[in-house]
Image (tube, helix red, strand yellow):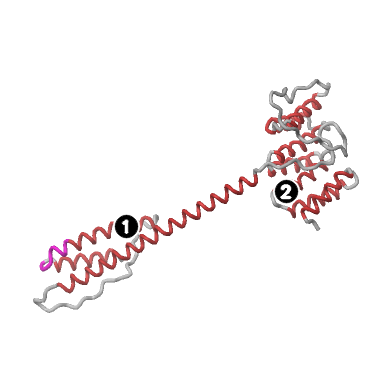
């Protein structure tokens, strides 16, 4: 143990003190410094070691007993060499610790750079995907107009004459917000439509358009949840087939082509006879892009 070695060193210093007091005092100071440095290293390497010490690689050797009257210079020389060796080991250990900490900082920085690059890639805005049905007024087979560029000083997108149907008016307000690319406001309005009018035919439209808003905003994870919820909650809704198609689009954005292929298969199996020719063509293109078997 380190404490035994230190005790032996102290005893040797006492023996040598009568013939080499200045040298012994100097060595005792070096030993004290080494003890303090060793404890610091121990706390850094073994923070939970409760003061345990590492066994030194150089153990004290058994010195022969000098004849009476012979000066104790051999013992003093021996302990000096051992202290010097211990100092060298301490310096080497400290250097290794600093190198390890430097490499760890490099790895942490590399991981942080990778995380930022991945987040930036996932949040890039995406162009609206093609559709086989209208989200506003038309029925199946009508193409939804692309969202126009925002117009400065434009009137309130939600303001419009009342149709006499609160659910219809609420949905069209959300649709106009989506058209103007005010995605957060559109999402809040569309969620309100689904929650307030779950039995209305526009609930399926609103839930599907909610997913499209997330997709256009560059949030494919939230979009996939919204599309799946539309298929799950409103399987007979007019926009359930469209939601399955866009769910596949969102999964491709998330780099999950195998899952997207399963969704396209589900769309064909469940709604094969009901989807429009335009949507069928879009699904065929999507399956080819995802390399579905």
Q: Secondary structure at mark 1?
A: helix
Crowd rating for badge 2 (residues with CA inside 10 Å; few <14, some 14–19, many 20+)? many
> Does 109 appear above or below 55?
above
Instruction: State the residue position of label 1.
Output: 39
Quadrant of image for the C terminus: bottom right
Give x and y (percent) for residue 276.
89, 43
Q: Is residue 252 magenta?
A: no
Q: Nearer the viewer, residue 35 or 221?
A: 221
Magenta part of the chain: 18-25
CA–CA distance in space, label 1 to label 2: 55 Å
Q: Tell us which disc is closer to us: 1 or 2.
A: 2
Residue 21 forms part of the magenta stretch? yes
Q: Nearer the viewer, residue 124 or 19?
A: 124
Closer to the N terminus: mark 1 or mark 2?
1
Rendered residue at 59%/48% (across/down): 117
Q: Quadrant of residue 87?
A: bottom left
Quadrant assignment for the N terminus: bottom left
- In the displayed structure, 224 sits above or below 37; it is above
Residue 251 image offset from top left, x and y in percent: 73, 48
Q: Residue 228: give x, y in percent of width and height.
A: 75, 43
Principal secondary structure, stretch drawn in magenta: helix
Q: Secondary structure at mark 2?
A: helix
x then y, percent, for residue 50:
36, 56
Does residue 274 appear to the left or right of 69 in the view shown? right
Q: Quadrant of residue 76?
A: bottom left
Q: Is residue 245 above or below residue 179?
A: below
Residue with the mark numbered 2: 251
| Residue ID at (46%, 53%) | 105
Residue 197: give its label.
none
Q: On the picture, is 16 further left or further right than 249?
A: left
């Amino acid at each position: 143990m380190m404490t035994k070695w230190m005790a032996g060193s102290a005893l040797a210093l006492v023996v040598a003190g009568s013939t080499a007091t200045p040298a012994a005092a100097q060595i005792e100071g070096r030993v004290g410094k080494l003890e303090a440095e060793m404890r610091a290293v121990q706390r850094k390497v073994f923070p939970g070691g409760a003061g345990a010490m590492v066994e030194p690689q150089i153990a004290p050797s058994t010195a022969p007993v000098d004849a009476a009257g012979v000066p104790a210079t051999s013992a003093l020389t021996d302990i000096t060499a051992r202290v010097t060796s211990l100092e060298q080991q301490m310096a080497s250990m400290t250097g290794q610790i600093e190198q390890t900490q430097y490499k760890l900082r490099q790895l942490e920085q590399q991981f942080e750079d990778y995380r930022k690059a991945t987040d930036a890639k996932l949040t890039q805005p995406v162009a609206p995907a093609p559709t086989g049905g209208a989200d506003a007024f038309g029925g199946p087979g009508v193409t939804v107009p692309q969202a126009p560029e925002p117009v400065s000083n434009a009137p309130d997108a939600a303001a419009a004459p009342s149709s006499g149907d609160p659910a219809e008016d609420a949905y069209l307000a959300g649709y106009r917000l989506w058209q103007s690319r005010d995605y957060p406001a559109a999402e809040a309005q569309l969620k309100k439509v689904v929650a307030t009018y779950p039995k209305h035919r526009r609930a399926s439209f609103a839930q599907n358009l909610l997913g499209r808003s997330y997709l256009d905003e560059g949030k494919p994870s939230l979009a996939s949840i919204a599309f799946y919820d539309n298929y799950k909650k409103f399987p007979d809704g007019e926009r359930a087939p469209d939601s399955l198609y866009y769910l596949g689009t969102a999964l491709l954005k998330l780099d999950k082509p195998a899952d997207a292929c399963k969704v396209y298969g589900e769309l064909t199996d469940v709604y094969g006879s009901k989807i429009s020719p335009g949507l069928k063509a879009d699904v065929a293109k999507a399956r080819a892009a995802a390399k579905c078997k």
